[in-house]
Amino acid sequence: MPLLLFEAHLVVIKNCILKKNNHNQPVLELSFKNIVNNNKTKEDYNNMIKSIKTWILVGFASLLLVACGQGGGGAGSKKSKTLENTKKAGFVKCGVSQGLPGFSNADASGNWTGIDVDVCRAVAAAVLGDADKVKYTPLSAKERFTALTSGEIDVLARNTTWTLSRDADIGLTFVGVNFYDGQGFMVRKNSGINSVNDFKNGISACTNTGTTTELNMRDFFNSKNISYEPIAFEKADEVVQAYDAGRCDTYTTDKSGLAAQRTKMSNPDEHKVLPETISKEPLGPVVRQGDAVWEDIVRWSLNTMIEAEEYGVNSSNASSLKDSENPQIKRLVGSEGELGAAFGLDNEWSLRIIEQVGNYGESYKKHIADTGILPNRGPNQLWTKGGILYVPPAR
């Protein structure tokens, strides 16, 4: 009887480990086949059991913990060092631009606004219960990734393009897209240039250092066999000032950036953005790799804003929809399900986002459309209205 009981324990451990660790499968399968399947005498059984008893007894606790506990999505997997530190600090550490109207821009009193700012405000509402509990750190394109990987900030919401090398090579994770964009060119209306096809050899182009814009610019001009003079600056305002002062013939960056920065020029109406788009620039928030729970919180904070717009849930009506007949709306406002438990939050985390920050459409209208930067949402319209804005469902 003790022998059979011990074998039963071995089978339980085997199943648990094999379920979680395929690397052990050949060894374990061999051991158990020798013990259970072959016609062995009692002495053979005892010898074989002794030969594996040592590693089972020594490794039992740790193997069981790894195989069946934390690795399986239990309570331990819900822990987040970033979340814990954020709650202790009482604010979300958010990296933003040094001033890009519509995306992240500070007024004379130091109040930050924009659709990127709203991502961090959404995280603060979800985690801390107050969208205003955010510490903003203005960063240049060159500084932004170091600030994130070093822990100076915990969310980078700074009109940053999602690329393979950034996502896979420098310890970062993009959690979504909050603006679909593309690179373009701005010129003076009196330049005689109406298309990129009008560019001539020797043209000078202003842009930012440390951006994908530099690479795209080089690829574009080389593909057209046009010689050009790059004039690059670290700070965005320096680029704007140089172009506005006539130091370069064209200014190139994301089209949304061109439209936003044009508002800062001495005579905005004297400049125009050319019609061509030379690249794909999906812009979105970024977090450090290694904290899956925090990554999920930031991702689903953004997703909540987008999905709320899709279902017509906004800052004015969210609370009144708790008794909606639509189960998806009820999940969005926290009256059905327990979605917050998936990353250690209460069930009204998403309701707070919608009430305090608004849905994506409200954010876009307030910061980009109504300010005249880009009244037409284009690809940033919902997928149900002809755009490509689409997120997984919260359920």
Image (spheres, rainbow, N blue to C red):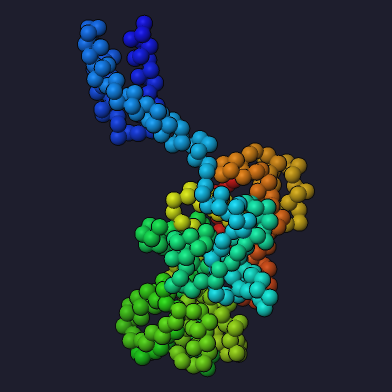
Q: Considering only vertical position in the picture, is 242 above or below 14?
A: below
Q: Considering only vertical position in the picture, is 326 above or below 231?
A: above
Q: Is residue 218 left or right of residue 289?
A: left
Q: Nearer the viewer, residue 86 or 240?
A: 86
**Quarter of the view holding residue 298:** bottom right
Name the image quarter holding the C terminus.
top right
Q: Considering only vertical position in the picture, is 55 above or below 135?
A: above
Q: Is residue 320 left or right of residue 170?
A: right
Q: Considering only vertical position in the picture, is 383 above or below 63?
A: below
Who's the residue at 50% across and 84% down the image? 238
Who's the residue at 33% across and 78% down the image? 223
Percent position of residue 21, x then y: 35, 34
**Quarter of the view holding residue 178:** bottom right
Q: Is residue 314 visible?
A: no
Who's the residue at 56% across and 44% down the image? 343
Percent position of residue 334, x then y: 68, 44
Q: Is residue 203 visible?
A: yes
What is the total number of numbered labels drawn onto the structure image?
0
Q: Is residue 99 left or right of residue 334?
A: left
Percent position of residue 221, x then y: 36, 81
Q: Nearer the viewer, residue 81 or 205?
A: 81
Residue furthest to the right: 320
Who's the residue at 22% across and 8% down the image? 43
Percent position of residue 383, x then y: 57, 57
Name the image quarter holding the N terminus.
top left
